[in-house]
Image (spheres, helix red, strand yellow):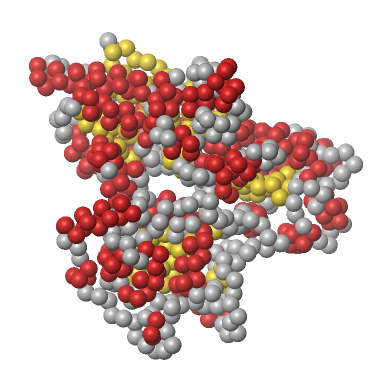
């Protein structure tokens, strides 16, 4: 626990302009990690900063993190792709370092701290700089490091790749050591996050290896624990980062790596072929896909393009590569898609049944070409892609060209349908959604929604309900159902029954039954994980440090009263939804269908037979207020149990399920409907939906 406490207190979190101004008034040298909300602070440098701080033991050296979007002074740093470290002495900018370059950061910290000491102790003149990279219309990014008045210029065009430190290396405590070696080798770490893959995510990520004999072993291994995911880059003027990274990690087979590349990462840290410590992609197309998979908001374009993208609404559209060309031309088509500026956010290879085809092409079944289309589309696997970009629907349709193959060849010979036409096959080989509305419908057919239970706890509901609901909607969740109710103590005990007997259980139950809670069903692709990410870490102190834009960082009070609850995995989500809302159906669009649910089950067990029985009155909040010593005890107990403050156990990825599997022509409803005989008339349903 001591190590974790140091990490939490190492860097001051700056959340607004007032705190920024206070930071500038601090005596000494302050190193500020300026980050973007989509990737968070740079975790790769934390161990370096802690090492420097511990070795120097100097009270005049300070570290801080600041999100660019929250602070007016940092406006010009918004949208930058790589980490930026600003050095302030006496409230003035004295140096800038771009990229998580450990040797350069260490050199700069030591030099600037020494210079600031001379200013404070000897009255030396402080060398103040301007960050030349922020000059308007400047096409180059400038890394400013005061060293005999010289500046080092680094241009903005770079190549990128994804690196993964696998669960075996993380579990053995080698991740930080590997990261230091990566930095020492000259790679720039532009983003860094910890992530535990579900089996479904691992299958999607490694689908190109599905034919290999060790595939199932690989999937089990990659979903067995935490990974470290990094974006690596090299400045323009150096070689492509992908072959350099593959050379650095060494051959896939560990024994070969030890013989041929004994200093490579796999030789040093791998144990077996599957357990080979690190991952690297083979080419730019794969790197682009992996970036979209792990960092969908990452932009490798210029700052001008990034600014334009921020001002335009991003779209998704569906693309289908039909069976006749999928096997032979897949990579060529994916490369064309990437070159056109479209990002592949999701992809799934699937063999469609006739029933599914009739449903998907329901408006085309009477057309003359439909029998040929049916035969083509059921002859083998189809690759479904979710493409994202600004104006994705129109951009993809222009890239495709006319639907008629002969017309495409004559009028748009550069189009994909012309280039990839099959001789003697009258059907074009690629599909694209016609409108944004069609795209939304078709994407849901291939990439179904997932559902999770979310709860706003009593104190947060009273103080921050509207703010939290707004944040949920802004994050793209559909609130499929919501109901506000005061839990009886018995109901709270049942809700958290899996933790009965644990030291914190009684205080958790008291807290959850002290006032109204808001129960919600949230629907979205990957809803369980995305809701947990939006909530942030259980401990609000840790949330402020590692995820300052999360809801718990903003609204939680302490490790017990941490504002929100979220299900740990899809299995638990379905169980809790049924427990709270009963047997209901949710359509693929996230709308509740059929029975109008309520929270009758959120009543005392003895009252459930009587629909008119009152709900237990709220327990006096003073009874559940923890004094200082009690609160510390609860925090310790929760930490020791390694359970979320709302009673959530750590996720076992091996049992996490996915809602993205396509059934025979329709999306599976969230919960199987019970043998209910009652029906609700359509006016009542419509009224209920409007009230939401």
Q: What residue is shown at x 41% (from left), y 89% (from top)?
A: 610
Instruction: Report whether 125 appears left or right of 457.
Output: left
Q: What residue is shown at x 48% (from left), y 24% (from top)?
A: 268
Front-lying residue, 101 or 151:
101
Q: Which of the 4 quarters of the picture holds residue 502?
A: bottom left
332 over 314 or under it: above or below: above
Front-lying residue, 408 or 151:
151
553 over 248 or under it: above or below: below
Position in image of residue 289 (x %, y %)? 59, 37
Q: What residue is shown at x 31% (from left), y 52% (from top)?
A: 640
Instruction: Report whether 625 appears left or right of 390.
Output: left
477 over 615 or under it: above or below: above
The reply to whether residue 155 is in sight is no
Instruction: Report whether 237 appears left or right of 61.
Output: right
649 over 122 or under it: above or below: below
Position in image of residue 451 (x %, y %)? 52, 61
Instruction: Report whether 213 appears left or right of 73.
Output: right
Position in image of residue 42 (x %, y %)? 37, 34
Front-lying residue, 254 or 342:
254
Position in image of residue 672 (x %, y %)? 59, 71
| Numbered marks: total | 0
The quarter of the rendered structure image containing the N terminus is top left
Q: Which of the 4 quarters of the picture holds residue 588?
A: bottom right
Looking at this rendering, what residue extends furthest in the left direction?
122
Q: What residue is shown at x 58% (from left), y 82% (from top)?
A: 676
Looking at this rendering, what residue extends furthest in the top direction?
148
Looking at this rendering, what residue extends furthest in the right direction?
424
The reply to whether residue 103 is in sight is yes
């Amino acid at each position: 626990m001591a190590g974790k406490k140091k990490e939490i207190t190492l860097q001051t979190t700056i959340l607004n302009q007032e705190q920024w101004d206070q930071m500038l008034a601090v005596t000494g040298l302050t190193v500020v990690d300026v980050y973007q909300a989509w990737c968070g602070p740079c975790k790769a440098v934390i161990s370096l900063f802690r090492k420097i701080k511990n070795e120097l033991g100097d009270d005049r050296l300070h570290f801080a993190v600041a999100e660019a979007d929250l602070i007016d002074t940092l406006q010009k740093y918004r949208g930058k792709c790589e980490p930026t470290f600003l050095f302030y002495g006496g409230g003035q900018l004295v140096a800038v370092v771009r990229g998580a370059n450990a040797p350069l950061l260490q050199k700069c910290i030591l030099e600037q701290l020494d210079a600031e000491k001379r200013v404070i102790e000897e009255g030396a003149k402080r060398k103040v700089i301007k960050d030349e990279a922020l000059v308007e219309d400047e096409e180059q990014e400038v890394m400013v490091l005061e060293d005999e008045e010289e500046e080092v210029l680094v241009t903005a065009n770079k190549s990128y790749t994804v690196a993964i430190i696998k669960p075996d290396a993380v579990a053995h405590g080698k991740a930080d050591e590997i990261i230091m070696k990566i930095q020492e080798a000259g790679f720039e770490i532009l983003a860094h996050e910890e992530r535990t893959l579900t089996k479904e995510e691992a299958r999607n990520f490694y689908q190109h290896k599905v034919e290999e004999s060790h595939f199932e072993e690989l999937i089990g291994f990659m979903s067995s624990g935490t990974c470290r995911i990094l974006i690596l880059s090299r400045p323009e003027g150096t070689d492509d980062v992908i072959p350099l990274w593959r050379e650095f990690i060494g051959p896939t087979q560990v024994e070969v790596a030890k013989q041929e590349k004994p200093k490579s990462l796999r030789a040093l840290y791998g144990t077996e072929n599957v357990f080979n410590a690190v991952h690297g992609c083979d080419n730019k197309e794969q790197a682009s896909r992996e970036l979209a998979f792990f960092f969908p908001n990452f932009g490798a374009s210029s700052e001008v393009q990034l600014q334009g993208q921020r001002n335009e609404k991003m779209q998704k559209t569906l693309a289908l590569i039909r069976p006749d060309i999928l096997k032979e031309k897949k990579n060529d088509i994916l490369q064309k898609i990437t070159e056109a500026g479209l990002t592949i956010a999701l992809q799934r290879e699937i063999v469609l049944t006739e029933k599914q085809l009739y449903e998907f092409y329901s408006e085309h079944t009477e057309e003359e070409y439909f029998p040929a289309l049916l035969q083509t589309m059921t002859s083998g696997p189809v690759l479904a892609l979710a493409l994202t970009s600004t104006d994705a629907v129109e951009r993809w349709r222009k890239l495709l060209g006319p639907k008629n193959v002969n017309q495409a060849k004559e009028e748009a010979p550069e189009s994909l349908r012309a280039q990839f036409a099959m001789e003697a096959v009258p059907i074009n080989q690629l599909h694209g959604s016609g409108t944004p509305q069609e795209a939304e419908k078709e994407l849901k057919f291939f990439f179904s929604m997932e559902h999770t239970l979310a709860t706003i706890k009593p104190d947060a509901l009273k103080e921050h309900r509207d703010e939290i609901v707004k944040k949920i909607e802004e994050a793209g969740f559909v609130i499929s159902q919501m109901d506000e109710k005061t839990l009886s103590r018995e109901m709270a005990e049942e809700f958290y029954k899996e933790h009965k007997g644990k030291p914190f259980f009684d205080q958790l139950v008291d807290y959850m039954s002290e006032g109204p809670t808001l129960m919600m069903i949230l629907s979205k692709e990957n809803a369980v994980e995305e809701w947990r990410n939006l909530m942030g870490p259980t401990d609000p102190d840790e949330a402020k440090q590692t995820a300052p834009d999360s809801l718990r960082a903003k609204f939680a009070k302490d490790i017990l009263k941490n504002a929100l609850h979220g299900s740990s995995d899809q299995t638990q989500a379905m169980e809790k939804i049924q427990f709270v809302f009963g047997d209901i159906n949710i359509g693929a669009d996230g709308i509740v269908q059929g029975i109008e649910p309520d929270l009758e089950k959120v009543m005392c067990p003895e009252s459930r037979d009587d629909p008119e029985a009152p709900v237990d009155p709220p327990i006096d909040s003073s009874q559940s207020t923890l004094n200082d010593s009690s609160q510390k005890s609860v925090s310790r107990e929760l930490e020791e149990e390694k359970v979320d403050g709302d009673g959530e156990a750590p996720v076992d990825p091996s049992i996490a399920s996915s809602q993205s599997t396509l059934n025979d022509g329709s999306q599976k409803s969230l919960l199987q409907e019970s043998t209910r005989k009652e029906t609700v008339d359509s006016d009542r349903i419509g009224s209920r939906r409007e009230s939401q």
